[in-house]
Amino acid sequence: MSTDTSIGDAGARLRALHRPGQPFVLANAWDAGSARMLAALGAEAIGTSSAAHAFTLGRPDMGGVSRDEALSHAERLVAATQLPVSGDFENGFGHDPDTVAETVRLAAEVGLGGISIEDTELPSSSPYGFDAAVARIEAAVEAARSLPTDFVLLARADGVLNRSYDLDEGIRRLQAFDQAGADALYLPMPPDMAALARICASVTRPVNALAAGPFTTVTYDGFAEAGVARISLGSTLARLTHRAIHDAGRAIFDNGDFSLLGGGMPGSEVDPLLIQGAG
């Protein structure tokens, strides 16, 4: 577990960034190098990504990483920069509320400023029943409030993303998570920006939006106008690196073409950013 006493204010620093209508970008990294690059480029906070982390282990997304692995990975990202880090902790790595509460406590011990907990009954894509989903967030909130330091708990309703319930049900769940005391709320990939604005208006807590898929065409100002407080990148940056590997690999192994290797950043540019990002 981390022993760095400077991490005690990570939750307070992360919380202060959540300003509806003035969102910050949660820059999701997958290793120390990507975290430091993002910090040097202007990120105010770092997030883990369950999918991006799974990719580094050669595994698919959706329950491909254990809790111990996620905690160890998060601790490395916490140590990589001086920025607060929020963990993508999927369903809390267990179905029952007590396990979710324990996950919150362990996440704080490794120095995370907060985590997200979703309502998907992994490894399936089915949602927990409404009452079970709320009970899990209630337990997570109670655990977070019992910690000696601030801790930002974000509650996710993933059924729209997973096509297992509609927007009205997603908002009903977010409102229940709001009532339960979650610090921030997240419904990934709503149908459109009007739906995102509706989500923001329907709850009292800060809302996270995902810059992925069709939402990559939305500007920062567009998210701000919708009332968003946080814009996360999810696994999008990691998937861009995999696209570069795929395209260059296809060119090399299918056609003997090495030309795509010529566009990489030189070490003379990368190295200073890594040093700067360590802060």
Image (cartoon, helix red, strand yellow):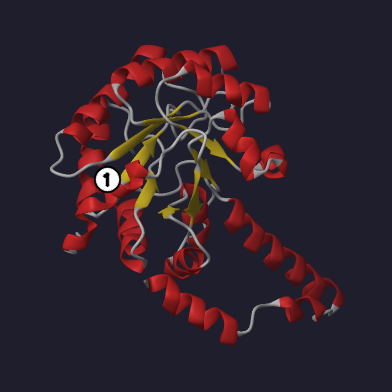
Figure quadrant of residue 36: bottom left
Judge by depth and name the residue closer to the eye, 186 or 133: 186
Q: Is 105 located above or below residue 95 in the figure? A: below
28 and 217: which one is in front? Answer: 217
Q: Is residue 143 left or right of residue 174?
A: left
Q: Quadrant of residue 155?
A: top left
From this view, report whether residue 160 is shown above or below residue 70: above
Of 266 and 128, nearer the camera is 266
Q: x, y (%) of residue 112?
A: 29, 51
Residue for point 42% across, 26% down: 119
**Quadrant location of the N terminus in the rendered image:** bottom left
Report x, y in % for residue 252.
79, 76
- Give coordinates of residue 146: x percent, y percent: 14, 34
Q: Is residue 149 above or below residue 38?
A: above
Q: Amino acid at mark 1?
A: Ala
Residue picked out by circle 1: 12
Residue 235, percent across and down? 56, 50
Q: Residue at x 46, y 35 (%)?
A: 123
Occupied quadrant, residue 12: top left
What count of labels does the image hold? 1
Residue at x 58% of width, y 87% of height: 268
Quarter of the image for the C terminus: give it. Answer: bottom left
Could you tell me which residue is drawn at 52 percent across and 46 percent down? Answer: 61
Q: Is residue 244 visible?
A: yes
In screen coordinates, is 130 left or right of 135? right
Outermost residue to the right: 255
Residue 164 in sight = no
Side of 56 relative to 102 (left or right) = right
